[in-house]
Amino acid sequence: MAIRVLLVDDQALLRTGFRMVLAAQPDMEVVAEAGDGVEALQVLRSTDVDVVLMDVRMPKLDGVEATRRICSAPNPPKVLILTTFDLDEYAFSGLKAGASGFMLKDVPPAELLAAIRSVHSGDAVVAPSTTRRLLDRFAPMLPTAGPQPRHKELERLTDREREVMVLVAQGLSNGEIAARLVLSEATVKTHVGRILTKLGLRDRVQVVVLAYETGLVRAGGQG
């Protein structure tokens, strides 16, 4: 079944370009377009969508607030933020609002397509290291956390799961975590899956955000 995509951007020319790229893929279908966040929310009330490509700077309702409303609904589609500038405050806010990642608008088509497929399959499309740089830059915007994590759900984690979570938040891949902890990559993947389940998170990006919010990891990546 084709991945159903909603294009949200206030520039019709950009939407046309994205539509042409996606239409050439046998496993993707652009089911609707919207010129702003308000229109996007209206479309989603009557259209089944798997992935939303969401611009952030739009009139009426920007992409960050639209993402927040979309992700707060039951069984929401995955949201992929499209931004003009790498590591800007809009990307940060988009991740906080529940997006599964962000991409630059001038990303090569092959990378955009891979990102859509990754998001649809449940993976985050922003490398943890990129998310870490993003959060390092905007850490002052996060609530001040004491030396001990304040998120009660973290108490559900085993010592090993907490150790893995810190390494995820520091930007390490599963393979790098496996090497660091002398575990198999499959075991690390299992730990990450349990962390997501116990904390009610969708992907690794949200793991990184929560680690920073709670003080489990501080700016600079120190756990």
Image (spheres, rainbow, N blue to C red):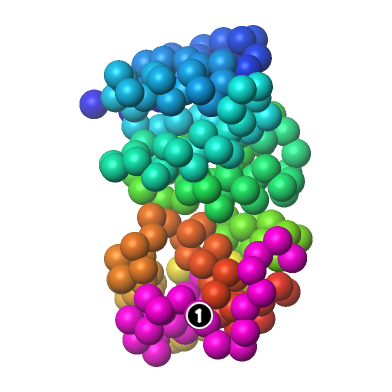
Q: Is residue 112 left or right of residue 83?
A: left
Position of residue 121 relative to residue 147, above or below, is: above
Q: Is residue 164 magenta?
A: yes
Q: Secondary structure at mark 1?
A: loop
Position of residue 154 relative to residue 93, above or below, is: below
For label 1, count other residues whose C-alpha is less than 10 Å away and answer few (under 14), some (14-19) or many (20+).
some
Question: Quarter-wise, where is residue 5 in the image?
Answer: top left
**Which residue is at the far front?**
60
Residue located at (29% from left, 42% from top):
74
Q: Nearer the viewer, residue 96 or 175?
A: 96
Residue 197 pos. (x, y %): 30, 66
Q: Is residue 124 left or right of residue 46?
A: right
**Which image quarter holds the C terminus?**
bottom right
Question: Quarter-wise, where is residue 121 in the image?
Answer: top left
Q: Nearer the viewer, residue 150 or 161?
A: 150
Position of residue 100 relative to residue 182, above or below, is: above
Q: Is residue 189 left or right of residue 175?
A: left
Residue 123 in sight from this viewpoint: yes
Residue located at (39% from left, 89% from top):
159
Residue 15 pos. (x, y %): 57, 15
Residue located at (38% from left, 84% from top):
155
Span colored in magenta? 140-168
Residue 190 in sight from this viewpoint: no
Q: Amino acid at mark 1?
A: Arg
The residue carrying mark 1 is 150
